Amino acid sequence: MRNAPTILHLDMDAFFASVEQASKPSLRGKAVVVGGLGPRGVVATASYEARVFGVHSAMPMAQARRLAPNAAYLVPRFMLYRTISEQVMALLRELSPLVEPLSLDEAFVDLEAGGTAWDEESARRAGVKLRADIRAVTGLTGSVGLAASKMLAKIASEQAKPDGLTLIEPGTERAMLGPMTVRTLPGVGPATGDHLRRAGISTVEELAEAGEDELVRLLGKAHGHALYAMALARDERPVVAEREAKSVSVEDTYDVDIHDRLRVGLEVQRLADRCVGRLRGAGLSGRTIVLKVRRYDFSTLTRSETLRGPTDDPVVIREAAARLLESVDTTGGVRLLGVGVSGLADYTQEDLFAQAMPVLPAEEPEKGVPEPVVERPEPAERQWRAGQDVRHAEYGHGWVQGSGLGRVTVRFETPQSPPGRVRTFLVDDPALESADPLPLTADPRHPPAGLAPPGSDRHEAPHQAPAASDDARPAGPRPGPDAGPPADGDPPVNGGREAGADRASGVGRSVGVGCEAGADRSVGVEGEAGGGRSVGAEPAEGAGQASSDPASLPKSWSGAAGGGVTSRP
């Protein structure tokens, strides 16, 4: 292990929710929850104001609504999150060529490899400058941990949350770790923690005192050895700049179980096409096609087929997925489907194209037989999701607060504007259209309006959760502070929901409608302000029907909406 704290761990603060607050002035200082809004949706990220009420990541959205009924509930905008993540990662690469991204909002940096830091003072300066640069470029805050190892740097960044910097001086690691709970160490989850607690081990100091032999007896050889080394603050893992992708996959979790076999087949074909899109986007191909099916009773089946060589051909992958589906019984209903490709390569086996689909001779149409008239279905009603960017021909840029009953409620504001006014339109209003997100900062070196300027934040521990804001007040309908006198035609504003609605239906990772019941009345999105410790994870299974955008691009390039995704404060 090093003798200087030159490994840096950056973790952006409540990343998804912070982006939404920065882009929507009316939500700054308010409780914001990002995730799937459907019946099976889960919380992806909650702002610190929402965490005061007990809302945390991976919590079922229905439970979050009960805890914080006046919070703003929004679907994720992964395209915007990835754009901001790229800006942050570019700043990290200015510090060192050795940057190990863990997700969109988290990364390790080897400062020594970049010549940026060589001792405690230079490391501290690098961390302070990084946080100021991130705020200037993105308008957001991140927490920085500095230590002599990756494990300690990550623990330090957790202590620094929110919006701070913690440096662990070499030689003080054992004393700092000793009183901490064993759950602080990576690899110690609820089951391992309970097992150790039953053995009388609750803190890291007690873990070290138990000895290596006892830990091996309790946890097995590999886990026991690793845990004992961590208890002694030993971690020799290097910062790795590139991680090889092992698979590319997409999954959808459905709000309602699918029973129709034909519909299941069509969903599998759609997932295969999305998977191919990700393959080609990454410049990869693969040999093994994998189908994942989670049935109504939560039993999960996985089937795979290995081809003669790697391919990224959509027809080949669709047909392989369809063959795999034939061996799965779906009569009881399906709640999740996934298609993946493994055995990746950076080239394509061209002769696989020939096996995709046999070339059939073209049949000449019989003469004198009129072509059938195809009836065109009526266009479907446009669907609007809570948090979606829109533009109106008269009022400009805004975002959807809710929709339903043939109407959509929009608040018109931009990242640099004051909190905007709310208006309601018919869902098929021709003047209203979807729009791309706006940049969070007008100037790349200055934060958006309403955020503190660089240098005004805290730089070091101790780190306290933000205190409740002055406008925090008991939950319940109330007019928004930015509403002002209603204009002609402006509907009334209430606390965080459509009038008469207790919950929203919609999707987190989907393109479905994010409708609120009773959406014929416009709503203000108000919430309780306050602070809280950072705890959480990004979307787990049940984040609604998935869209083509993954929550992150982790080690496996997986776009799964289901399964455990790493903890993200």
Image (tube, rainbow, N blue to C red):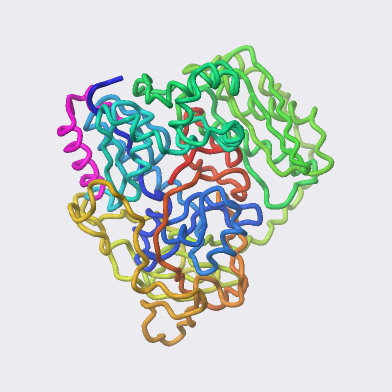
**Is residue 352 toward the left or the right of residue 417 in the image?**
right
- Most extreme residue toward the right is 331
Can residue 397 be seen by looking at this rendering? no
Q: Is residue 538 left or right of residue 464?
A: right
Q: Nearer the viewer, residue 542 or 248?
A: 542
Relative to 550, residue 50 above or below: below
Residue 261 in view in this figure: yes
- Per the image, is 114 magenta? yes
Image-based side of 481 in relation to 342, left or right: left
The x and y percentages for residue 560 are 57, 38
Q: Nearer the viewer, residue 229 or 523?
A: 229
- In the rendered view, tell whether residue 467 sits above or below residue 249: below
Q: Is residue 372 depicted above or below 417 in this figure?
A: above
| Residue 165 place in picture, x, y as percent | 27, 43
Q: Is residue 563 left or right of residue 469?
A: right
Q: Depth check: give the residue in front, 154 or 31.
A: 154
Q: Position of residue 320 (x, y in %)?
A: 69, 25
Per the rendered image, the range of residues in magenta is 109-135
Q: Residue at x 76, y 40 (%)?
A: 295
Residue 133 location (% of width, % of height): 21, 45
Q: Quadrant of residue 143?
A: top left
Question: What residue is drawn where x is 35% and y is 48%?
Answer: 161
Q: Quadrant of the N terminus?
A: top left
* Residue 266 part of the magenta segment: no
Which residue shows up at 63% across the image and 60% down it? Answer: 379
